[in-house]
Structures are given as C-alpha cells and as structure tokens.
Image (cartoon, rainbow, N blue to C red):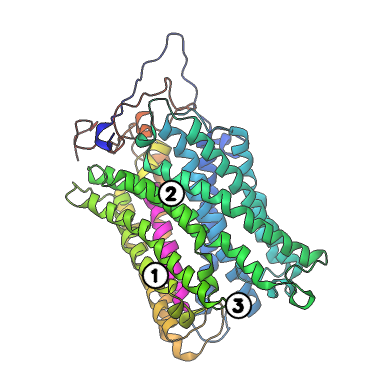
Amino acid sequence: MTQSDVSMSVTASMPAGHHPPHAWKWYDYFTFNTDHKVIGIQYLVLSFFFYLVGGLMAMAMRTELSTPDPDFVDPGFYNALMTNHGTIMIFFWIVPAAIGGFGNFLIPLMIGARDMAFPKLNAIAFWLNPPAGLLLLGSFFFGGSQTGWTAYPPLSLITNNTAQSMWILSIVLVGTSSILGALNFIVTIWKLRVPSMSWDRLPLFCWAMLATSTLALFSTPVLAIGLILLLFDINFGTSFFKPNAGGDVVIYQHLFWFYSHPAVYLMILPIFGIMSEVIPVHARKPIFGYKAIAYSSLAICIVGLFVWVHHMFTSGTPAWMRMFFTISTLIVAVPTGVKVFSWVATLWGGKIRLTSPMLFAVGLLAMFVMGGLSGVMLGNAPFDVHVHDTYFVVAHFHYVLFGGSVFGLYAGIYHWFPKITGRLYSEAWGRVHFVLTLIGTNLTFLPMHELGLQGMPRRVAMYDPQFTDLNVISTIGAFILGISVLPFFFNMAWSWFYGPKADGNPWAGLTLEWTTASPPLVENWEVLPTVTHGPYDYGMGYDQKATA
C-alpha cells in the first residue's frame, strides 16, 4: 500500500450518558500528574528554564572572550561556566524539550491513545529531572565541575571532587529518566495505536521517536556505566581510569563517546520528526518520500552507533580504525541527506505559508546543511586532526545543535502552540523572533570557523590578541541571540492568556492531534478516532479547510 492509498478520518460521536472529562487546572502542572499532556508541558517549561540559565552562562562566557585577557570572570569560574553551559544545553534543554516535551504531548495524540503505556513511570521519569538540575547548579557552591562536559580523566579525578561527583550524579539521574522514557515511548507506539493505524499510516514524528528511543536504550546505559566507574575512582579508591594505578583513560573516552555521539541523534531525530510534520502542513502538499524518511530514521539509529571513534582520532587511534570510522561517519550522512532532499522536494511547488513555524523550519534547513557540511569535513581524519580542539569544532556543533535543534524546537512550539494552549500567537512577534535568531546565530557562530582555521583553541578564557576582532563579532552576535528570546517569551506568555482563541485545527492539519479540541480533553477524545486517510494527503480531497 502506498502513502497515497491510505486515508484518515475521525468518529466524533459521544455515547449516551457519557460525560466529557474536565480540563486540568493550572495547579495540576505543579503536581505528580500522570496525564501525558501535563507531563509534556512540565518537560517544556522546565527545559525552557534551563535554556535561559544555560544561555546566561553562554553570554557571560562570550563577555569574557570579548577581550584576550581574563578580566570579567576568574579562569576557574570560566571553566565551571563552560562545563555547565554544555551540560545544561544538552541534558537539560534540547533532550528533555525534544523527547520529553514534544514526545509526551504528541505521541498518544498522534496514534489515537488516551495516554502513555505506563503513566506513573512517565511521571517518575519527569520528576527525576528537577533534583538532577539542582545537583548540577548546586555544584557551583563547591567550585563547579571544571572538566568540560566530557569529564575526561585524569583531569576529572584531580579537580573539585565534590563538584565533579555532583555533576556525575546529576547526569546519571537524567540518564535514568531518559531510559525510562524511551521504554515507555516504544511500548506506547507499538501497542497503543488505534487498530486502524498501520505502520505505513504512522506520522513521521512517531517514526522519529521510535528510532530515538531505540538509540537511547542502546547507548545511555553505556554512559551511565562509565560515569559510575568514574565516581568510584573519585570517591572509593578504585582505579578503572587512573593511569598511575593501571587504569586506562582511553577506555573512558570510548564509553563516553559511545553515548555522546549518538546523543547528537537523540537531539536531532525528534527535531527531524517535527520538520516532517511542519513542512507538509505549511506547504499544503503531501510529503515527498514518506517511507524514505521513516526508514532513514531507523538507518540513522543503527549507523549512529558505529561512528563514535571519530571524536578520538587524536587519542592514539590506529590508522585502520581511523579509516573504518571515517567511512562509517560519512555513511551516516546518507540517510540524513535523504531527509533533507525529501523536505526540499516537499517544498518544491507547494503553496507555502510563511508562518513562524515554517520560517524556523526553513531556517533550520539552511543552518543544518551548513553544520552538516562542516561535519563531513570533521569526519575525515586528516582534516579532523588539523583542527582538533579548535573553534572550528565549536562552530560545527553549534550550527548542528543550535541551528538544527533549537530552530526545530521553535518551529514545533509555534506549530503546536494553538493545540497546547487553545490560543493563537502573534505572527508579527514570531517573525521578529525569527529574524533576530537568524542574525544572532550566524553572527555568533560563523566567525568561529575562521577562528578555528587560524588555530584558536577552544575551552580557554585567554587567547592571543590576533583573535580579538573575530571574538568581538561573535560576542555581539551572542548578545543579539540573547535578546532574541525576549519577543519569544513575551509572545508566548501574552498569547497564552490573551491571544485569540484557536479552534481544534487552525492549520488544517491531517494528523490525529488536530481532530480533538484545543487544548485537548483530559483523555484526548470522547470517542477514539478511526484512521481512514493518510497523515499528509493534502490536495487529495481530505483538506479540512480551504488552503490559506
């Protein structure tokens, strides 16, 4: 059966004597609530809080780097800022927002379920995050972890043991949360789809979440093992990674990167899913290559487990291993390229509406392609050895993670804001937010490529004065990026309370979440829907509204 052969419709009748469930009150969002939508919003709000905290740390670091000398913060405190900025942005912002936030809110709605498979486990997974965040921020009272987010031994064995232990315990807690959430997503998608939703009718965001969860189950326990062994070395006298007692620091690097490179895909795969939902809706066109996009998510999940050593080309890696991991790194670009070409083909000839979610989706395409191209360069061992630990690497992963993940998160927030809140946001403020974000992103991270090629090392508070001009440009960009969040938060807060009321389907979407009220009922539907047409069959007689 092809994608165009399937169709989807909804039965909306209510059985006699059935009373609609009530809506949640504001104070329910501060409790141990088991509703997947409440948990999704809890994840989003908490992750946006940490986004602000991590962003303020980044602005403090860029202020320090506006001059060559350490005249704004102490170098030791700079190291703590750098460590916790990276940790927060990965483990407390992008991962919980993309997986916990959007995954929890959307998955049951998209497959026609009333909740996740294990609601209490779902709530437990979320409530592991606040104490983890407190542990991380509390480490500042003990000087803060100063090893960078990699926590490589032997440095992590000899600096600020208490702060380093708190950092490790914090990551183990969020890792446990990630494993519990991944199990829940897989079982939910596998078992709770309405009977009429076959695999080839599954929305692409669900395919992306299935691949993400599988990847998390394989990779996250490996990081947890490495960190627990490191914790034992720091506190209990073991010597797994102590070179002067027979330990091996390179083993730690293998354990760390076996998780931490796939972590890039944990962050970006749900964003790819968001892109696959936003683009066809706002282009009013069936998505190009449904099966190719769905299967490429699984391909990234599998191949992504075999690329971690490209982070270790300078760690004494043998030549044959460099060659193998160069090839595997380049191969993972193929399924990623399939998605990019499919999105561009979907845009081609579409009736594009330049709404805020569409602007951020198109912006993501441009930023991610730039980050992807520099990623292909870094995947080649000769080039990687040349620029290893320089600002070229910083530029690359910020184009991928900020230009990719954060643009995608914004696209998703704007796209589903009417569904989450029942209100419409201001398009004018959304466009101001997009323009400031686009300018700030490129002004901040583009000069870092040149800084890296000129040889400026990363993770330093002091540098040679020849790098000053480019660092000043980058710092100006960082402040524009910081200012860019103001119209976003103003827009979201004002619109949530005072925005025009949205109906159930303001974008005329065809996936199941648009068939219920905005915001959705407590158990999502009064009567579970029946799938009779495809999620992206725009222009095939299923449009629920005239094209705008």
Image-based side of 25 in relation to 506, left or right: right
Q: In the image shown, does 47 or 375 lie closer to the viewer?
A: 375
Q: How far apart are marks 3 and 1 (CA)?
A: 35 Å
Q: Which mark is residue 73?
A: 3
Q: What is the span of residues highlighted in magenta in the rendered image?
A: 391-412
Single out the mark in the foreground, 2 or 3. Answer: 2
- Asked whether 402 falls inside the magenta stretch, the response is yes
Reply yes or no: does residue 478 show up in magenta.
no
- Label 1: which secondary element: helix
**x and y, in percent, of residue 149 in the image:** 60, 67
Asked whether 341 or 479 is in front, the reply is 341
Q: Which of 153 and 317 is in front in this view?
A: 317
User: Can you tell which quarter of the image residue 69 is in?
Assistant: bottom right
Q: Is the magenta stretch mostly helix, strand or loop?
A: helix
- What is the quadrant of the N terminus in the image? top left
- Disc 1 crowd rating (10 Å Cα; few below 14, some 14-19, many 20+) is some
Residue 298's tag is 2
